[in-house]
Amino acid sequence: MKVTEITAKEFQNMIRAAAHRISKNAEFVNSLNVFPVPDGDTGTNMNLTFQSGAKAVLESDSQSVGELAQKLGKGLLMGARGNSGVISSQLFRGFAKNVEKKQSLTASDLAAAFAAGVETAYSAVMKPVEGTILTVAREAAKAALKEAKGTDDAGVVMTTTVEAARRALAKTPDLLPVLKQVGVVDSGGQGLTFLYEGFMEALTGETSDAAYVPNDGEMNEMINATHHQDAQIQLNPDDIVYGYCTEMMVGLGKGEDNQEFNYDEFRQYLSGYGDSLLVIADDEVVKVHVHTEHPGTVFRYGQQFGTLDKIKIDNMRLQHESIIERDTESDDNDPKPLADFGVVTICSGNGLAELFKSLGVTYVLSGGQTMNPSTNDILDAIKAAHAKKVIVLPNNSNIFMAADAAAKEAPVDVAIVKSRTINQGLTSMLSYNPERSLAENAAEMSEALSNVVSGQVTQSIRNSTIDGLEIHEDDWIGLIDGDIKIAEADRFEATTKMIDAMLDEDSEIVTLIYGVDGSEDEAKQIGNAVTADNPDIEIEIHEGDQPLYPYIVSVE
């Protein structure tokens, strides 16, 4: 059928079909994830990103394509996850900006919007790399513009766009040696091609299953090769220069005494602290993705311009090592039966994750302070625990309601042990016994929560007075069981005073967990200071990798 005008209804159909297509193929895209480093699952990130935008479009009753495109762009930005998700959001942000005043789209409008999206995405990436999603988007847009000069059929333009995307995708291994080395095409480019195929399906009536037919025999061989499943195993963890994949969203002007935001200055400053930098901004929020050795510096810089939301940090070296271990030991042809028991915990920081796993936790969901997981996130984690009975440790009171809701929707029996802090979660695991019933474990672990005093050290972002305690901006503050009790200009002083306030005559063990902004050396100095005044106290020190809190302390 010929489509000379894309109406709001047809645009919604395009978005719906693309959302279905990327969702259906997310795991396949994940299997291609290899470049530049394993900082997340590309298919999952692109799927979650696009579903966020699609939801905004499909829930709207607007009859204007321009208005719907604005909703798509905003939804994608707010839901963007990972490098590929952020770039995808920028492709459609530029698309939306180009068509914002249009009631409907012609074939030429569609092609011009794709080209505008490419321009926006390239401007958002500090160092564009050929052989990635950007290359696929650019070549597809060029073909669309050329085709639109000779036809008024948007379906024909979209078909040409898809064909060009497939050709560009097939050539990505020639542009990135690592892709050719392991026999895969670029995962982000593949994800974008799936989205465009969804658009084509909606405009032409071509079915999803028929939409993906590789034009190149070599590409067909690549995507069907079994060795692409363990592509990441061929990368060397020592080659990762910047080890922490760091993300944050800054609500501009939502804090106190914020600096005026300048996009170029902001991006230039962060470029000195790592690579794979993406800085996306509109009038309300800034979204940042960067690989760095100093995530704390990135977070503190962002706080100068507003409040932080959806922060995320992954230790890519440890992540990569776990991928190697998983791929060398697993046997996909022998699916594991459900275990009798599983435990899900929520925390941020690979060191903390390893601590929990060493105590028997089955699945660690990344999140917690300032990045609370959704009900659906927790439900997915419960399923990933792959067990008949599952215990969930929220480690944050703000997560209790979402955890309760997830438990009600779960296909297995679930108990929520309402740990309010990381310290409580770790302590409760000492009472976990897989030989007990679910109810018995929940009761014993819940009772253990009161056996620990929890302390956290972080830095104040504004002047304040709380319960008579005067706090200055940049002071180091100590929270004891959630209440601010200490404020000092010196971090060492704040931490030692906080620990002293946590101790009583029955205290025996102090556990000190240092984060990305703390250090083992300083932790040892703090421990020495504590034992100098309390010689009977035993000190344990662990690396947690947690953001924003240089030290987490428990006293038992």
Image: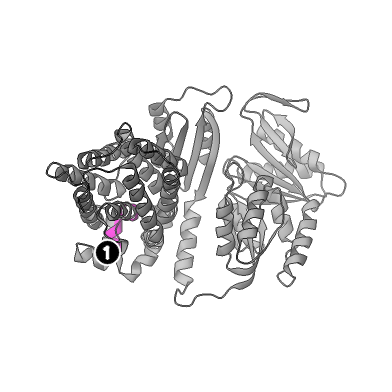
Which of the pair 65/80 is nearer the observer? 65
Question: Which image quadrant for residue 225?
Answer: bottom left
Can you say whether 304 is above or below 121 in the image?
above
293 inside magenta stretch: no
Q: Position of residue 520 (x, y in %)?
A: 62, 46
Residue 514: give x, y in percent of width and height.
Answer: 63, 46
Picture mark count:
1
Q: Residue at x 25, y 57 (%)?
A: 173
Relative to the observer, which residue lies in front, 5 or 24? 5
- Circle 1 sits on which residue? 210
Q: Is residue 187 magenta?
A: yes
Residue 360 position within the rendered picture, expressed as x and y whole percent measured from the top left:
65, 64
393 left or right, relative to 75: right
At 42% across and 38% down in the image, what residue appears? 74
Residue in view at x 27 percent, y 60 percent: 211
Q: Is residue 283 left or right of residue 207?
A: right
| Residue 219 appearing in the image | yes
Where residue 59 sits in the image (x, y, percent)?
45, 44
Residue 46 versus residue 33: which sits nearer the camera?
A: 46
Residue at the left extreme of this rendering: 150
Q: Amino acid at mark 1?
A: Ala
Left or right: 21, with 221 as reference point = right
The answer to whether residue 471 of the structure is visible from this angle is: no
In front of the other: 514 or 97? 97
- Count neighbours of disc 1 (C-alpha within 10 A) and say few if under 14, some if 14 to 19, many if 20 or more: few
Q: Residue furthest right?
A: 505
Q: Which residues are magenta?
A: 178-190
Residue 263 position by quadrant: top left
